[in-house]
Structure formats: C-alpha cells, structure tokens
Amino acid sequence: MSESPFLSKIGTKSAQRPMRVDLEIYYEAKENLYHSKENPEGTFPMNMAENHLCWEQLRERIQQVTRENDIPEWVASYTDPAGSPSFREAIAGFLGKFLFHCAVDPETIAFSGGATSVIEMTSFLLADPGETAVIPAPSYPVYTADIGTFPGVKRYDLQLPGDFSKSEYDFDLGLLEKAKAEIEKSGSNFRMLILTSPDNPTGRIYRESDLREIATWCMDNKVHLIVNEIYGLSQLDITHPDLRSEYDDPTHFVSFGQLMEELKSPFLHFWYSFSKDFGVSGFRIGLLHSHNMDLVQAYRNAGLSHSVSNYTQWVMQELLNDHTFLTSYFKDFQKLLTQAYVTFTKGLKKLGIQYNPSRGSLFVWMDLSEFLEEKSEAGEEKLWLEIYHQTGILLTPTQGFGHSQKGWYRAVITSIHPTEMEIALGRLEKFIQKKKEILTPEK
C-alpha cells in the first residue's frame, strides 16, 4: 500500500480500506430493490443490521410528539456533552423498566453519536494504543475498525467451542487465561473483554451465572469487561409452538446492567444504542453506562465532537417517557421478530440447512459450508457472490467475524418486509436445490 502524499498514515489507510467489504455491493443492491409489480426481479439486501419491522408504528408516535409539543428552550443551546440531564433521566427510566429491571442512576450514563462512536470513545478512554481487546468469535466484524482506527486497540478473536447447536454460551474461564498469556507473550496487554448479548451473529445469550464468573475474573485481573446489549430487547418468543423444541432447558435472559448495579465495579461497563431494538439507526444515539465515574467524566470532557443533537435527544426523551407506548411497541416488535425468524428458519429446515438456534438479535447464522468449492476465504467470497448474482439475496459475507469454521453466513431477517420473505426463500430454495443436484452424482 503506497502512502498518499496528501494524507497522514492513518488517512492513507482509511482512504484505501473500505469500512465494510460488502458496502459497495450493498449500495448496488439498494438501487435495485425488489417490488412485486415494478421490479419483481429486484434484490433483497439482507446483509445490513437494520430493523424495519415496526418503523411505521414508531414514526407515527414520533410525528405525534413533534406535532403536539413545543420545542423546549434548551434544545437550541449547548448542553452537557454526555447528554442533557432530562434525556439521561428518561434513559435511566427506560433502562430500569424495560431492560435492567432495577433502578439506574442517570449520572452513570453518557451518550455519543451512535454505537460506533460509543465503542470508539470507550476504547480510546480505557485502553492505550497497542493494548488488546478480546472478543469471543464469531462476532461483529466492524469491532475491528471501531476499536482500532482511532483508539489503536488490537482485536483478539477468542475461539469458543464451535458447537452452533446451542442458544446459550458455555464459557470456559480457562480460555481467558490462555488468551491473557498469549497476549502478554506478544508484548501487549489484555485490557478489555467485549461480549455481545444477544450476540451478533449467532443470537446466543450469556447465562447470568457465566456473566458473574466472567465479571469476577475481569475484576480480579483488572480487565475492563464491556457487555454490549444493543439487541437486548430484540428477543425471540421461545415459547412459540414452532420454536419450543429448539431450546433445551433455556435460562432467563438477565441484563448485565442488573449485575453492574449489584457489583458497582469500575471494571464493568455497558453499551447500548437505539439503532436495533428501535430500528432508528439514522438517529445516531449510542450510550455508555458505567459506575466508573472517572470514565464518565473523561467521556464528558473528551466527547464534545461525538455528542448527540439536542433536538434528537428531546424527541427520543419524549418517546422514552411514554412507557405505555413502549410496552405496546415491544410486544408488537417481539411478535413480528419471532414470526420473521420462524418463517426464515422453516425455509432452512426444508432445505436441510443447519443454523444456530437464536435467543435474540436480528439475525440467523446459517451453515452453507457444504456448497463451498474450497474451505477458504476465497471459497466463501465466491459462494457469497454466487448467491447474490443468482438470487438477488445479499447475505453478510463471512470475512471479519473472526471464527475458524468456514462456510457460515449471516442473514438479517428484519431488513426486508415480511411479505417479501417468502419470495426470497423461494429463490434461495431454487439455488440450494440446484447446488445439491450438482454435488450429488446421478445414480
């Protein structure tokens, strides 16, 4: 890679390295979307983690807020870079009622422009360049850029046991000890452990008992544990008659925020954003919750360039204070999310495709390895493009998730309209059947 004479080293890397490997083809697909009458041969982008299931319901309530309420004076002025006091109070009430199920101190909350900004800011303030964040694999590919581009933190993909038949993680603390030894041997420092629950892409959750053990290990070893619950309210109804058999003695999802309130450790932190559960990624609101008040103050002092628009804070504040609406919204959202999951996984079962049983998130993590010509990144990319060009279905490519198994792909089941799901599945079925005919010699 040759350096640009006009940019810094970081600038050169940023100019030559796309944010996501699938971004260009995603924009191409967006220009050719499926429409039953106007474009029946169009595409189904199912690679970007967007939630469109309840947008109409949410939009109607937001329009009501802006129509029936006067904009307060504080919206036009500067406010606390960590978030206006009234916004933080509304968020504390929302988290306490719907996710943590315990009281939340508004002073432990700080905001910035989207989940990416929160990840970047937290990494920048907790870790020095060259230190390492450990992330169980497979996991969100863009963590690498979020913690690395500006904070300069390295990513270590922790290889958990590769049994994708479970909806909950079996976590072995010995893996953390091994990672710590390897990282220190390389000359770095194990500074952060990042967990996502429900996870991206598997939809698995971490048991409360495991979270407690992991938290204790991190506190004892002075490692910052951050749990990202960006999909915390995107939970499936596992009592659905078509899903019950997939879950063997499931445990109840417990938010990490509940443990944080109990332990109040400076090494335990929480991330959230409104982009997934609410489907408003364009609003750009992410939050950090921590009882480490030095971190919250540092966030306030360093975060002015990352702050959230006051107008956006006000609109969301009014929405979040309406707990009656939110109760109805999340009931409807869970129902639609569960139905989308049931529809998609039924299609996979019909085709004999294995997938990881999910407890939540917007995804299905499925195994298409039998159709790889070779078990390599090149083989994975070839199959990914083949699926797109022959079916119009754009899945998330496998690069960057950090796992060792080849041939697993992510489908975002909330990114297309529910009525379009059957059309997409029909195309996928034709593709898979054709592939199987090629792989199975005639008798």
Image (cartoon, rainbow, N blue to C red):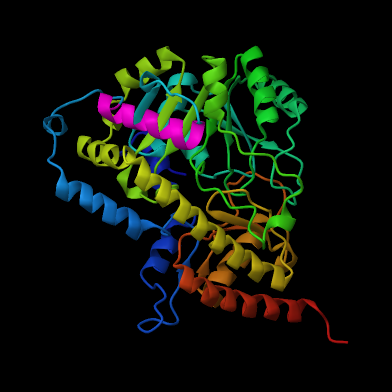
Which quadrant of the structure image shows residue 246?
Answer: bottom right
Q: Is residue 84 visible?
A: no
Examine the rendered structure and indicate whether residue 403 appears above or below residue 156. Answer: below
| Residue 192, horizontal then vertical, whole percent | 57, 24
Task: Name the foreground residue: 242 vs 73.
Answer: 242
Q: Among all residues in the image, which is located at the extreme front?
A: 324
Pick out the residue farthest to the bottom. 443
Verify whether residue 93 appears in magenta: yes
Q: Quadrant of residue 177?
A: top right
Quadrant location of the C terminus? bottom right
The x, y position of residue 302, in whole percent, is: 32, 21
Magenta part mainly helix, strand or loop? helix
Residue sitting at x 55%, y 63% = 339
Task: Report the residue that reaches farthest toward the right.
Answer: 443
Residue 279 is one of the magenta-drawn residues: no
Residues in magenta, as a range = 83-100
Q: Is residue 192 above or below residue 163?
A: above
Where does residue 349 sit, x and y in percent of width and height?
71, 68
In the picture, measured across the screen, residue 241 lies left or right of residue 419, that is right
Q: Residue at x 54, y 49 (%)?
A: 361
Q: How many marks?
A: 0
Residue nearer the viewer, 377 or 30: 30
With 421 as the anchor, is 352 left or right in this view? right
Considering only vertical position in the picture, is 238 above or below 77? below
Image point (39%, 51%), residue name? 279
Q: Position of residue 168 (x, y in %)?
A: 69, 42
Asked whether the viewer can see residue 41, the reply is yes
